[in-house]
Image (cartoon, helix red, strand yellow):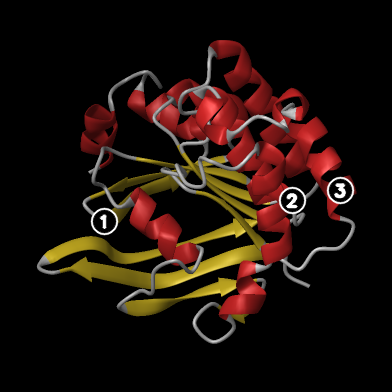
Amino acid sequence: MSDILVNVENISKHFDKTIAVNEISLNIKAGEIVALIGPNGAGKSTTMRIITGFLQPDSGNVLIKNMNMLKNSYECKKNIGYLAEVSGIYQDLTTREYLEFIANAYNLSDIDSKIIEVSKLTRIGKSLDKTLENLSKGMKQRVFLAGSLIHNPDILVLDEPTEGLDPNQKQEMQTLLKKLAEDKKAILLSTHVLEEVSNICSRVIVISDGKILADETPKKKKKRAGDMNKSFAELTKETK
């Protein structure tokens, strides 16, 4: 059985006359943490939305565990945990109520124990009975991550998962993602933190103008770019 959990085949997406994604192909194996990096407007979030089934591509296919997303959307989505770039919804709910809502959407049983489990994993236990609108940005990010994990998916798609976290929280998030990869989760994340790519990712995919410019290990990218702290503009320019 193949350990490739995500297989993206030549997907393209247009918005009016703008080409957001231009014939992108990639795959992610179990246990991999793959970073998608590039300048704002490069097509990262659109690519992630297509992979998770929130957008349909104009052409191409997405296979999740060998199932076609267009033909088996429900079954595919059960295998994916998605942390969107903007998750500012249900602000009047408590953390517990939000997690219950997500769990019920997946028709999970024994919801209370699953909430306890993801709360320990993401360190949000003290915020379970607080409303989302009263949480810090960093704590909200952890809550939404917990929501993406509650159904124990094999695939995680995380759009800027450490955005708004303080240095300690970022370190905790990186440690958690490494643990999830060790548990054979396939993880695709976008980030603007190049140090994060170097610390935890097994591969880095550079995207610009809707096209993949490079797909390689962080070590090779660092060697070729010279310095992982260079700007995205420099990185993409050197890749062309």
- Ranked by sequence position, the earlier of labels 2 and 1 is 2
Q: Residue at x 52, y 38 (%)?
A: 217
Task: Report the amino acid beneath label 1.
Answer: Gly
As measured in the structure, the alpha-carbon distance from the residue carrying label 3 to the one carrying label 2 is 11 Å
Q: Residues within 10 Å of mark 3 (few under 14, many from 20)?
A: few
Extreme residue toward the front, this view: 92
Task: Please indicate, yes or no, whether residue 31 appears anywhere in the rendered image.
Answer: no
- Which residue is at the front of the view, 204 or 161? 161
Q: Residue at x 30, y 70 (%)?
A: 12
As measured in the structure, the alpha-carbon distance from the residue carrying label 1 to the one carrying label 3 is 42 Å
Look at discs 2 and 1 and give the one toward the viewer. Answer: 2
Location of residue 68 (image quadrant): bottom right
| Element type at mark 1 | loop
- Ranked by sequence position, the earlier of labels 1 and 3 is 3
Q: Residue at x 72, y 28 (%)?
A: 124
Where is mark 2, residue-wise?
150
Where is mark 3, residue-wise?
112
Indicate the quadrant containing the C terminus: top left, top right, bottom left or bottom right: top left
Look at discs 1 and 3 and give the one toward the viewer. Answer: 3
Return the mark for residue 210: 1
Left or right: 234 with respect to 27? left
- Which residue is at the front of the view, 211 or 170? 170
Q: Residue at x 46, y 37 (%)?
A: 160
Task: Report the amino acid beneath label 2.
Answer: Ile
